[in-house]
Amino acid sequence: MASVCFCFWRPRVSSGAGSGEELKALLPGEAAARLQSLRVVDGRAVLVIDAEGLDAPARYRLESDVVAALGGAAGVDEVRVAMMADKAAPVPAPSAPASPGSRPPRILAVGSGKGGVGKSTLSVNLAVALARAGCKVGLVDADIYGPSQARLLGTEDRRAVAHEGRLVPVQSEWGVPVLSMAHLSKPGQAIAWRGPKIAGALVQLVEAHWDGAELLVIDLPPGTGDVQLTMLQRFKPAGAVIVSTPQDLALMDAARAVDMFEKGGVPIVGVVENMAGYACPHCGEVSDPFGAGGAEAAAREMEVPFLGRIPLDIAIRREGDAGTPTAAGNGPQAEAFADLARRVRDWLDRTG
Ligand SMILES: Nc1ncnc2c1ncn2[C@@H]1O[C@H](COP(=O)(O)OP(=O)(O)OP(=O)(O)O)[C@@H](O)[C@H]1O
């Protein structure tokens, strides 16, 4: 069973205190060799250590050594160590990129702590908006049990084929190639797999022939299960976008998702508030069925960027169901997705 040791915490104000390189130099040899990431937030040093192959006493010793080494360092008030271990499943080795020398696509994970907040809708529209802005982007539907991207991109009737042992993505009309379990299984077929098989499926989808793609948007299932762990441990996304509705329960789950990515060493691109403000199509009155401004306030509290709001609009649902993504059209909601894509692109450019 896959496990990552996550003790939940929230980042405080970043003071920029302490240099990661200086702290790394203080680590004992084994900890330095196993270090996945190290950051300092407001005097708190957060380390992610690969603990694969270590038994419990050895992990404890390693953690104690790290705390002892960094505990007295200048600018460090507290040391937190997250041990990542027990890889999810024996999965095949990463395959080579399509053409020699070509860079594999960067990975942008789209996650949420809670189901039904519009993560798939957000992922597909973000991918389409990025493609419209000139980015070569592919979309992976990592929701293995409940795939929806084939429908959202109007590719339900197509099946993916394999070439030289790797899947070939299905082309959509919107400039975004896509792979989903729905392209591999019969329509309506239920998928009842256990963790290792799920992890293997994710690898097949991500390591397909994404020739020429510079970015893969990954629509993750909600929560923190096998798919998320495989994604963190094996593919190390360049960043993660977190989707939430403004209601308190969804925001609490979003905070958990932020926490999971941060502990896995994946930077948070930001939080998007979906289904924010409902404009009645009859009288035009705007109401807030899930509250207002909650995601922005939560993002501030978690010290992560706020990427914007997508309103609750029946057209977004209708166009999703029809396989004609809103971002491919014109109008205020298409513009809202284009704005989101601009922010994500800026972030990728800054960090690439
Ligand atoms: N901004 C929006 N306005 C109107 N409807 C929306 C909006 N966002 C999502 N929806 C609708 O809400 C429903 C759930 O959206 P979606 O499937 O994208 O959520 P999800 O978080 O991916 O769900 P799951 O957890 O099941 O994967 C869908 O019917 C979708 O069309």
Image (spheres, rainbow, N blue to C red):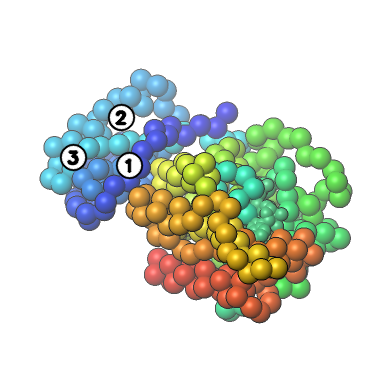
Judge the density around disc 1: few (<14), some (14-19), many (≥20) Cα neighbours within 10 Å: many
Secondary structure beneath label 3: loop
- The residue wearing badge 1 is 47
Determine the CA span between mark 1 and mark 3: 14 Å
- The residue wearing badge 3 is 77
The verdict on label 2 being within 8 Å of ligand 1 is no
Lower sequence index among marks 1 and 2 = 1
Secondary structure beneath label 2: helix
Q: Are marks 3 and 2 in contact (CB under 8 Å)?
A: no
- The residue wearing badge 2 is 62
Identify which amino acid the numbered label 1 is placed on.
Answer: Leu
280 to the left or right of 20: right
Report the mark closest to the observer, 1 or 3. 3
35 to the left or right of 314: left
Residue 160 shows in the view: no
The verdict on label 1 being within 8 Å of ligand 1 is no
Judge the density around disc 3: few (<14), some (14-19), many (≥20) Cα neighbours within 10 Å: some
Q: How many marks?
A: 3
